[in-house]
């Protein structure tokens, strides 16, 4: 997997985060489950990047309380930070392993490409949970399929 393809996947991820958060704000959602899941996966995007950059994660909470505007701000910061990360890493560096401590204090060594794939898959999983919750509340879920993005959005970017 090349850096350029990873960047394409992350552009999809960031676009869908933006679309979802805007829909939640526009729908005036007050559902606690939706708010918690959104805060979680937007925060863990930041946590994984902090690990990749070997930054201190002491005190970081993986299930924080964030309002939708706070999640929107964090999502925008994540986009900027990941783009900067991709600008400054080589394909060779992406193939290396990362040694880190997880939120439970357990030590791991994981390939960086696997970590970055996890970030994309993790976000997709939780966006799906939120879409299912929106449907139960009577709202129209947003289209989050990657192929929809490729066919209609990526071509215009």
Image (cartoon, rainbow, N blue to C red):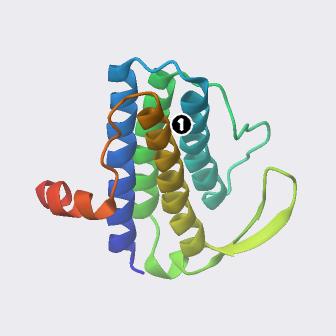
Q: In this view, does 141 lie above or below 5?
A: above
In this view of the protein, which residue sits in the foreground, 77 or 33? 33
Instruction: Give the left or right position of residue 81, taking residue 110 as reference.
Output: left
The residue sitting at 18% across, 54% down in the picture is 153
In percent of width and height, residue 111 lies at: 63, 76
The residue sitting at 53% across, 36% down in the picture is 38
Q: Is residue 96 above or below residue 64?
A: below
User: Looking at the image, which residue sits at the far right?
Assistant: 105
In percent of width and height, residue 126 lies at: 53, 48
User: Looking at the image, which residue sits at the far left?
Assistant: 156
Secondary structure beneath dot 1 equals: helix
Q: Residues within 10 Å of mark 1 (few under 14, many from 20)?
A: many
User: How many numbered discs?
Assistant: 1
Q: Is residue 58 above or below residue 115?
A: above
The residue sitting at 59% across, 67% down in the picture is 115
Q: Is residue 122 above or below residue 6?
A: above
Whether residue 9 is visible to the viewer of this picture, yes or no, is yes
Query: Where the C terminus falls, by quadrant?
Result: bottom left
In percent of width and height, residue 89 lies at: 47, 68
The residue sitting at 52% across, 75% down in the picture is 94
Query: Where the N terminus falls, by quadrant?
Result: bottom left
Q: Quadrant of residue 3?
A: bottom left
Q: Mark 1 points at which residue?
A: 38
In percent of width and height, residue 152 lies at: 15, 56
Instruction: Give the left or right position of residue 24, taking residue 129 as reference.
Output: left
Whether residue 77 is visible to the viewer of this picture, yes or no, is no
């Amino acid at each position: 997997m090349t850096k350029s393809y990873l960047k394409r996947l992350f552009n999809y991820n960031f676009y869908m985060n933006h679309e979802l958060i805007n829909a939640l704000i526009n729908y005036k959602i007050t559902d606690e489950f939706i708010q918690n899941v959104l805060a979680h996966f937007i925060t863990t995007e930041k946590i994984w990047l902090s690990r990749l950059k070997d930054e201190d994660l002491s005190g970081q909470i993986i299930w924080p309380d964030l309002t939708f505007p706070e999640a929107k701000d964090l999502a925008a910061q994540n986009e900027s930070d990941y783009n900067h990360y991709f600008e400054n890493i080589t394909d060779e560096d992406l193939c290396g392993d990362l040694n880190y401590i997880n939120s439970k204090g357990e030590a791991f060594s994981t390939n960086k490409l696997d970590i970055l794939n996890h970030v994309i898959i993790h976000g997709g999983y939780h966006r799906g949970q939120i879409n299912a919750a929106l449907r139960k509340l009577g709202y129209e879920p947003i289209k989050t399929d990657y192929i929809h993005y490729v066919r209609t959005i990526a071509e215009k970017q």
